[in-house]
Amino acid sequence: VQLQASGGGLAQPGGSLRLSCTASGVSINNKPVMWYRQAPGEQREWVARRASNGYTEYAESVKGRFAISRDNAKNTVYLQMNSLKAEDTAVYSCKLYYWGRDYWGQGTLVTVSS
């Protein structure tokens, strides 16, 4: 099982980015997937999750601005990030829970700056 995260980059405050997390070796359908982030000098924090039944949940800091979705055909989970703020700057990583294990993708850097 491998996860490949991509889509990070530089965005201006108020801008948008869409992160992708593509799985190989396992179908993401009906699997819980989560996004985390770690800002420089900070602890990693949970950002969003999509449960196996499709239920979504968000950290208060991103609620109303970020949205997690899934494309089963592409075996990919997305994190749409809108109204970006400087404090959203971080390395974002995705995690899949499967058969009692956590599988992590490598991080993708998001920088929000003017």
Image (tube, rainbow, N blue to C red):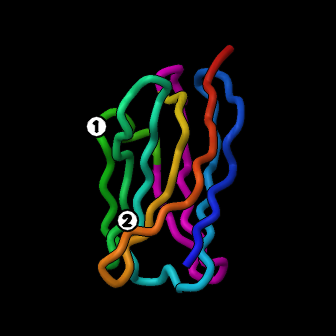
Towards the viewer: 10 or 62: 10
Q: Is 33 above or below relative to 43?
A: below
Instruction: Identify residue type, mark 2.
Output: Arg
Residue 23 position within the rendered picture, expressed as x and y whole percent measured from the top left: 59, 74
In the displayed structure image, the side of residue 80 where residue 32 appears, left or right: left
Residue 85 position within the rendered picture, expressed as x and y whole percent measured from the top left: 51, 23
Q: Any mark on residue 50, and which? A: 2
Residue drawn at (40%, 59%) of the image: 34
Q: Any mark on residue 60, and which? A: 1
Tell me the quarter of the picture where residue 114 sits.
top right
Residue drawn at (49%, 29%) of the image: 88
In the displayed structure image, the side of residue 30 where residue 114 appears, left or right: right
Q: Count neighbours of disc 2 (C-alpha within 10 A) and say few if under 14, some if 14 to 19, many if 20 or more.
A: many
Magenta span of residues: 67-87
Given contact means CB atoms under 8 Å apart, are the residues at marks 1 and 2 in contact? no
Tell me the quarter of the picture where residue 16 sits.
top right
Instruction: Identify residue type, mark 1.
Output: Glu
Residue drawn at (46%, 52%) of the image: 67
User: Which corner quadrant holds the N terminus?
Assistant: bottom right
